[in-house]
Image (tube, rainbow, N blue to C red):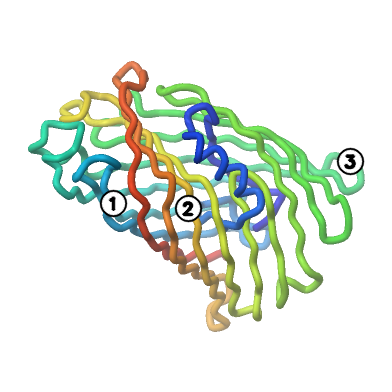
């Protein structure tokens, strides 16, 4: 993971449960390699990425109703620009026992996200000191895209503090109809000499960190933890709230294997087994005001991604 090309997701600390706050701070000492689209590397002019995954069924705390979901996505990167699309399909268990909706129809089934992201980096003119900046515009919706748009921006510095050590500092802001979120970008990374072929590397920071050991150019394994969240605009005819919004967030931890087959240079495959913890589901009306919040039980999941650069 390159420290000079960074894409993060915003977090509003005031909206995270107390246990989630403590756990989020502890992720600075934990590890996670985020499986999200990012700009093509310096060696790859173009990169195509496919992503799939699922999370097992879990009930809302205090209720018998719950849900599971699967997701699939694709991203196309060209130099500093990335266009990505993700769709999630929700399967509901005991929808009649949920505290929202009409207890007959499923609250929602498909959620979509379309994102256009730009990432830039360069040298400041000071030895060992570089900069990064970027922004994104996105839409996240159930059926109608109106009032589903948001945008964000980020900027900061990357400092080569010593041989094989790199420090990054910056900030990130994201606007959505539910409000404005801000988050610091910070991290310290290190890699062993020759880690591209064999050896250890890690990146500690927020909102995600990773620890990796590469056995050979073919295989690497990493452990991890990080913070995920998403905001979607509900349908006009939603049984939950007409043209309102849902925000879902959770802590993810897992183990991942990374394959780079020799028969097709440029191909990278990642398979991971994940645990999803401290899950929360929030509901907002069409004005972006929150009116309900529910905790969701822990759930196991997996991710599978394939990226090809050329």
Please state which of the two labelled residues, at mark 2 or mark 1, is closer to the viewer. Answer: 1
Name the disc covering residue 58, or none. Answer: 1
Residue at image location 59% in from the left, 44% down from the top: 207
Instruction: Pick whichever of labels 3 and 2 is earlier in the sequence.
Output: 3
Does 223 appear above or below 59? below
Disc 3 from disc 2: Cα separation = 38 Å
Between residues 148 and 187, which one lies in front from this camera angle? 187
- Where does residue 37 sit, x and y in percent of width and height? 51, 52
Name the disc covering residue 125, or none. Answer: 3
Do callouts 3 and 1 mark residues in contact (Cβ within 8 Å)? Answer: no
SS class, disc 2: strand
Please state which of the two labelled residues, at mark 3 or mark 2, is closer to the viewer. Answer: 2
- Where does residue 187 sit, x and y in percent of width and height? 71, 47
Between residues 86 and 55, which one lies in front from this camera angle? 55
Residue at image location 89% in from the left, 41% down from the top: 125
Residue at image location 87% in from the left, 50% down from the top: 161
In the current view of this chain or complex, which residue is farthest to the right?
127
Does 258 appear above or below 283? below
Quarter of the figure with residue 203: bottom right
């Amino acid at each position: 993971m390159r420290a000079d090309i960074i894409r993060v997701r915003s977090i509003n600390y005031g909206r995270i449960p107390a246990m989630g706050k403590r756990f989020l701070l502890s992720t600075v000492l934990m590890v996670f390699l985020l499986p999200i689209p990012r700009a093509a590397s310096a060696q790859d002019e173009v990169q195509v990425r496919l992503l799939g995954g699922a999370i097992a069924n879990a009930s809302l705390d205090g209720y018998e109703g719950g849900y599971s979901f699967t997701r699939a996505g694709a991203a196309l990167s060209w130099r500093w620009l990335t266009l990505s699309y993700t769709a999630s399909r929700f399967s509901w268990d005991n929808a009649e026992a949920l505290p929202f909706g009409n207890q007959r129809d499923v609250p929602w089934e498909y959620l979509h996200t379309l994102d256009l992201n730009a990432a830039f980096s360069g040298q400041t003119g000071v030895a060992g000191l570089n900069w990064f900046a970027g922004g994104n515009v996105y839409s996240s919706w159930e059926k109608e895209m109106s009032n589903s748009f948001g945008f964000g921006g980020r900027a900061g510095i990357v400092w080569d503090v010593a041989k094989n050590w790199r420090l990054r500092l910056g900030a990130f802001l994201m606007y959505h109809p539910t409000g404005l979120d801000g988050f610091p970008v910070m991290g310290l990374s290190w890699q062993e000499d020759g880690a591209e072929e064999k050896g250890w590397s890690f990146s500690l920071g927020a909102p995600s960190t990773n620890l990796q050991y590469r056995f050979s150019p073919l295989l690497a394994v990493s452990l991890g933890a990080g913070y995920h969240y998403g905001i979607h605009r509900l349908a006009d005819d939603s049984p939950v709230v007409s043209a309102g919004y849902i925000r879902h967030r959770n802590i993810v931890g897992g183990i991942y294997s990374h394959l780079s087959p020799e028969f097709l240079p440029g191909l990278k495959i990642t398979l991971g087994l994940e645990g999803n913890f401290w899950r929360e589901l929030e509901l907002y009306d069409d004005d972006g005001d929150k009116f309900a919040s529910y905790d969701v039980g822990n759930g196991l999941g997996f991710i599978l991604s394939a990226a090809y650069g050329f």
